[in-house]
Image (cartoon, helix red, strand yellow):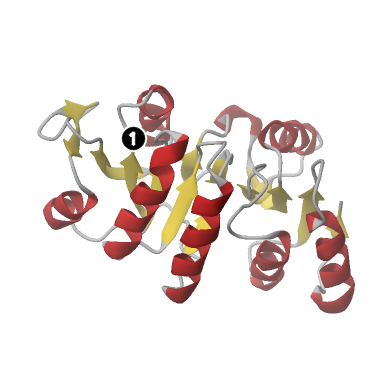
Amino acid sequence: MNFTSKSTVLVQGITEPLGSVYTPLMQAYGTQVLAGVSSGYGGQTQQGIPIFDLVDQAVAAVGAVDTTIIFVQPYAVLDAALEAIAAGIQQIIVITEGVPPQDMVYLLRVAEARETLVVGPDSSGIIVPGQVLLGIHPTELYRPGRVGLISRSGTLTYEVALQLTHSGLGQSIAVCIGGDAIVGSSFPQWLEILDEDEQTDVIVLIGGIGGDSEEAAAHYIAEAIDKPVIA
């Protein structure tokens, strides 16, 4: 996991409505957005960020990229993510919701083989308060601290973060794993990450409706997690 102020970031779908709104907000928070990709817009810039037609072109021009954030339309997500994996990007955050399940099954097989972390789809992304914004979290609700948030719901993450902040409890990281039927990284994966994270003292887990991910998380917490978990 490499989510720090030094992380280098690519935005796929930078000219899409959400991409065009949230890329400047990520930049303003200090996120190092090196380039954007939108087919047909190569050679243009947005808020000073160069835009390329292909991921390979972007990486060749700006150098290694740690994380890509995907805002493209649902049926274009698979191609966008595979393009990122082929270019050697190992952390993928899919903001788009409604990605076809078969596409996600295929993507996750490829990602596992290439040891690539996939967050989402239907995710608000990741925020490390005070350091980096990778997605669409409203930054004013967060403050740096020692509580790690893992959630299936973006808006519930915001609500819990606000309540923690009002109580004087800052957050080490907030991760929305996504609300689609099939998502990439799971509750157990992130529980393990935060259990080993030296910046996190306690974990807050926020569930959703449908599926058995909360039950899987409960079993995993009982078997393998040492830090306190509030769900």
Q: Is residue 115 above or below residue 130?
A: below
Residue at x 63%, y 45% (from the top left corner): 178
- Judge from the rendering whether residue 209 lies leftward or rightward of residue 81; answer left or right: right
Crowdedness near tag 1: few (<14), some (14–19) or many (≥20) residues, C-alpha within 10 Å? many
- Judge from the rendering whether residue 43 lies leftward or rightward of residue 203; answer left or right: left
- Judge from the rendering whether residue 88 lies leftward or rightward of residue 202; answer left or right: left
Outermost front residue: 102
Pick the front one: 210 or 106: 106
Residue at x 48%, y 49% (from the top left corner): 93
- Measuring from the top left, give residue 148's x and y in whole percent: 70, 54
Pick the front one: 115 or 197: 115
Q: Is residue 156 above or below residue 80?
A: above
- Measuring from the top left, give residue 189's x and y in whole percent: 66, 67
Check disc 1 and report the residue beneath it.
Answer: 13
Does residue 169 appear in the picture of this structure? yes
Quarter holding residue 194: bottom right
Total labels: the figure holds 1
Pick the front one: 108 or 201: 108
Residue at x 67%, y 42% (from the top left corner): 179
Quarter holding residue 162: top right
Q: Is residue 39 above or below residue 85?
A: above
Does residue 128 appear in the picture of this structure? no
- Measuring from the top left, give residue 156's x and y in whole percent: 75, 34
- Measuring from the top left, give residue 90's x and y in whole percent: 40, 64
Residue at x 63%, y 62% (from the top left corner): 199
Quarter holding residue 69: top left
- Amino acid found under the numbered disc labelled 1: Gly
